[in-house]
Image: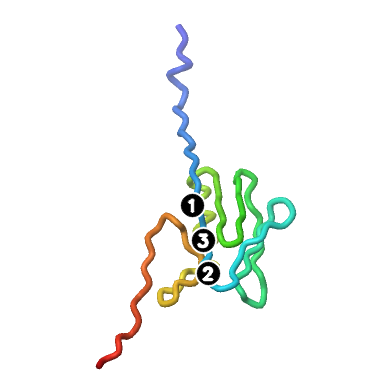
Amino acid sequence: MFYATKFLKPRKLITYGYSQIILFGLNYSFTRRRGRKIVLNLQYAYNFGFRLPRSFIARVYKRRFVLFAEKLLLLRFINELVETRKPNIYTGKGLRLRSLPYRVKPGKVRRR
């Protein structure tokens, strides 16, 4: 008898997903440099540069960044990226995920 199947562990299914990161703000942009280097311009005195992991597939538009990869790695990477410029609750400027709902706080109401 062949008992090898009894000792094999079931493999976890690797699920892939994609997400879109959108920049809201005046003159904010993504640019792609040679190879896997991405530069994020947020109108600070310096630009944020980061490298994409090898397992990621990315498409860079001016204000939109589309990523395709394994879900767990993708979520970890996106959380680190959004930390660089969280959305402002009053003006809405910053990095946002397209799939998450977002609401801007209302301003002060003038009394009449």
- What residue is shown with label 3? 22
Q: Nearer the viewer, mark 3 or mark 2?
A: 3
Residue at 48 percent across and 69 percent down: it is 86
Q: Which of the two labelled residues, at mark 3 and mark 2, occupies the earlier sequence position? A: 3
Q: Amino acid at mark 3?
A: Ile
Of tags 1 and 3, the one toward the viewer is 3
- Left or right, residue 77 beside residue 99: right
Which three-letter amino acid code belongs to the residue tagged 2? Arg
**Distance from the alpha carbon under mark 3 to that under mark 2:** 12 Å
Query: Residue 111 location in percent, x, y?
Result: 26, 91
Which sits in the foreground, 11 or 9? 11
- Residue at image position (35%, 82%) is 107
Q: What kind of element bears circle 2?
A: loop
> Which residue corresponds to mark 1?
75
The image shows residue 2, relative to residue 19, as above or below, that is above
Across and down, in percent, residue 77 comes to: 54, 54
Which element carries disc 3, helix, strand or loop?
strand
- Mark sitting earlier along the chain (1/3): 3
Residue lying at the far right in this picture: please name it: 34
Instruction: Residue 61: give its label.
Output: none
Amino acid on which disc 1 is placed = Leu
Give the alpha-carbon distance from disc 1 to disc 3, as whole Å: 15 Å
Q: For the residues carrying marks 2 and 1, which lies nearer the camera in this image? A: 2
Quarter of the image holding residue 38?
bottom right
Q: Which residue is mark 2?
A: 85
Point out the residue furthest to the top here: 1
Mark earlier in primary sequence (2, 1): 1
Q: Position of residue 87 (x, y in %)?
A: 46, 69
Instruction: Give the percent coordinates (x, y) of residue 20.
Output: 51, 54
* Relative to 107, 67 lies left or right: right
